[in-house]
Structure formats: C-alpha cells, structure tokens
Image: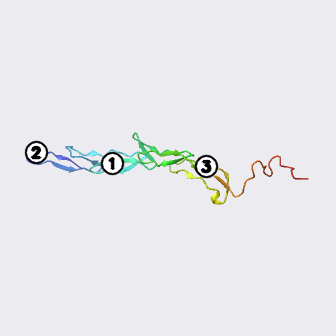
Amino acid sequence: GTFVQRPCRRDAPTTCGACPPRHYTQFWNYLERCRYCNVICGEREEEARPCDATHNRACRCRPGFFAHAGFCLEHAPCPPGAGVTVPGTASQNTQCQPCPPGTFSASSSSSEQCQPHRNCTALGLVLNVPGSASHDALCTSCAGFPPGTPEPGAPGEQGKGRA
C-alpha cells in the first residue's frame, strides 16, 4: 500500500507514501509510484475483491457461469431424460446423468434432478401411460377397456347393437 516517495540519503531515511485511490502495491517494493488497478470485470463476471491500497481488483464468474480457459461459460442444462447430479459452480460445469428407471426429467434444466414417477395406485388412480425417462406416468380415474375391446364410438362400432 506504499511506494518510495523519497529514497534514503546519507542524512535522511527513505520516505514512503501511501497509494492514492485506484492504485495499489501488494508487496514490499522500491517503486516510485503505485500500480494502477487495471483489472476490469467482464460482462459475465462480478467483483470478487475491490481494488484497495494493497490489491488489484479481482473478478469471478457470475452465478450461472463457470470459469474455463480464462472465460466465463454458461452452465450447460441437462436435457430431458437426464437430471443434475452436481450443480454447476464458479469453477465447474453442471454434471448430468440419465434418469434411472422409475424417475424422469421432462425439461432442459441446469438445476433440476430426476424426479420419481407419479404412483397412480397410491393416489387411488389407474395407470394410463407408463412414465419414461423424459415424462411422468399419466394416471386416470377411469379404468381403461380390456385389451382387444373396442371403445364405444370407435370405427366399426357404428350400427352394432341396433335392430
């Protein structure tokens, strides 16, 4: 936080001066002036530490982004059918895994985990469409028609049962 204002002489010791605003020195030095705080945070960054007399400004990636090769990249979303196993951090991308049997993820998300399929029986309902990795089970309150039984109004049913 200081610089050499006046070097020592035979009759006087070295005089140090304090760094002015927006300037710093981090280490013991012989500098004739403090260094300018020249770090500017980018569009996808935020200030992690402000410029002060002893440190330059430091930046970090904003929430939703991670640092990779000097750039802040957006956390990748997991596609439908996969869920987040490890959320993205400032230094690591989102980690995804395919949804295991009995679970699903219907949306593209960088935060949602795989969710268990709806249990129709426990809800007092009938399973209409089984769930998959990318959609939930669909339940109905009505039992379907037995396999092979045509539904009323289906093609080929007109005129049957009439005299």
**Does dot 3 land on a helix, a strand or a loop?**
loop
Label 3 belongs to which residue?
135
Badge 1 or badge 2: first in the primary sequence: 2
Seen from the viewer's position, the closer of residues 97 and 93 is 97
Q: Is residue 42 left or right of residue 143?
A: left
Q: Is residue 2 left or right of residue 73?
A: left
Which residue: 12% across, 46% down?
8
Badge 1: residue crowd in 10 Å (few <14, some 14–19, many ≥20):
some
Q: CA distance from mark 2 to mark 3?
A: 81 Å
Badge 2 or badge 3: first in the primary sequence: 2
Nearest to the eye among marks 2 and 3: give it: 3
Nearest to the eye among marks 1 and 2: give it: 1
Label 2 belongs to which residue?
9
Which residue: 14% across, 47% down?
14
Q: Residue furthest right?
A: 163
Which residue: 49% across, 48% down?
85
Q: Does the image show residue 73?
A: yes
> Are circles 1 and 2 on residues that touch, CB within 8 Å?
no
Disc 2 residue type?
Answer: Arg
Seen from the viewer's position, the closer of residues 22 and 115 is 115
Badge 3: residue crowd in 10 Å (few <14, some 14–19, many ≥20):
some
Label 1 belongs to which residue?
57
Q: Give residue 66's quadrant in the image.
A: top left
Q: Position of residue 120 (x, y in %)?
A: 64, 56
Disc 3 residue type?
Answer: His
Q: CA distance from mark 1 to mark 2?
A: 35 Å
Disc 1 residue type?
Answer: Arg
**Does dot 2 land on a helix, a strand or a loop?**
loop
> Are circles 3 and 1 on residues that touch, CB within 8 Å?
no
